[in-house]
Image (cartoon, rainbow, N blue to C red):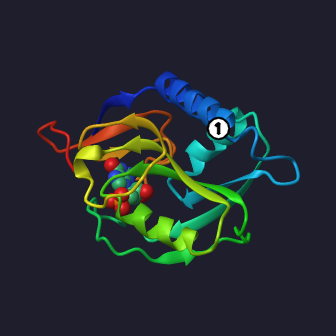
């Protein structure tokens, strides 16, 4: 396995994040305030880089929380089993909440999270994902804000890992097999 060229450059990521932030700010400007800010919930660890850039581009009051769920580990295939490793610190009842995801693949993680969050009575619940692999979807789950749709390849960088490596890469790159083909 080796890393292929950049699928999304630093500049393309920055433009995508800025466009998402403009759309979200416009949608929530009349619904949130300093007293009742938009609550961004980042899904650890992959969403950390995206969330830190996104929050600084938003032009509305925000507060933050995080949730950690089980991920693929050393494999690149979803097990479909979602385990909460770290829960929210903040009650979300009556809050406007946006779940911040790095990437939506099968949608199984998000399907679970949406149900879990809904049962806690937020005023509203939406999802923003930097990347989406629509070809891989097996759960019928809504993603209100999508940065970029990408092909069915396993990608790393900008927070996304392969076995905990490569999260620090500034661009998004495809993991290739040794013949140079993108792999999942
Ligand atoms: P899903 O439940 O939608 O299949 O998977 C969601 C999670 O799987 C993402 O939040 C991410 O952690 C991981 N994931 C899915 N596709 C990729 C990928 O191409 N690269 C990396 N690094 N992680 C992925």
Disc 1 target residue = 27
- Residue placed at 64% from the left, 38% from the top? 27
Percent from the top left, x then y, of residue 30?
76, 40
**For residue 52, side relative to residue 37 (left or right):** left
**For residue 125, side relative to residue 143 (left or right):** right
Is any part of residue 72 visible from this angle?
A: yes
Q: Quadrant of residue 36?
A: bottom right
**For residue 21, side relative to residue 104 (left or right):** right
Q: Quadrant of ligand 1?
A: bottom left
Percent from the top left, x then y, of residue 58?
70, 36
In the image, residue 151 sits, relative to residue 69, either above or below, namely above
Name the foreground residue: 127 vs 86.
127
Name the foreground residue: 55 vs 183.
55
Percent from the top left, x then y, of residue 137?
27, 54
- Residue placed at 45% from the left, 33% from the top? 171
Percent from the top left, x then y, of residue 135?
23, 46
């Amino acid at each position: 396995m080796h890393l292929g060229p950049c699928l999304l450059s630093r500049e393309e990521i920055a433009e995508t994040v800025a466009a998402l932030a403009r759309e979200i700010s416009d949608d929530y400007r009349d619904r949130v305030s300093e007293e009742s800010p938009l609550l961004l919930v980042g899904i650890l660890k992959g969403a950390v880089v995206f969330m830190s850039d996104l929050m600084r581009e938003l032009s509305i009051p925000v507060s933050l929380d995080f949730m950690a769920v089980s991920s693929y580990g050393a494999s690149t295939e979803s097990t479909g089993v979602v385990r909460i490793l770290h829960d929210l610190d903040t009650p979300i009842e009556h809050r406007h909440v946006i779940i911040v995801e790095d990437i939506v693949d099968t949608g199984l993680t998000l399907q679970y999270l949406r149900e879990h969050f809904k049962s806690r009575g937020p005023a509203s619940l939406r999802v923003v994902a930097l990347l989406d692999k629509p070809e891989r979807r097996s759960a019928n789950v809504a993603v209100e804000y999508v940065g970029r749709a990408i092909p069915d390849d396993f990608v790393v960088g900008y927070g996304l890992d392969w076995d905990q490596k490569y999260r620090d890469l500034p661009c998004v790159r495809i993991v290739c097999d040794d013949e140079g083909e993108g792999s999942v």
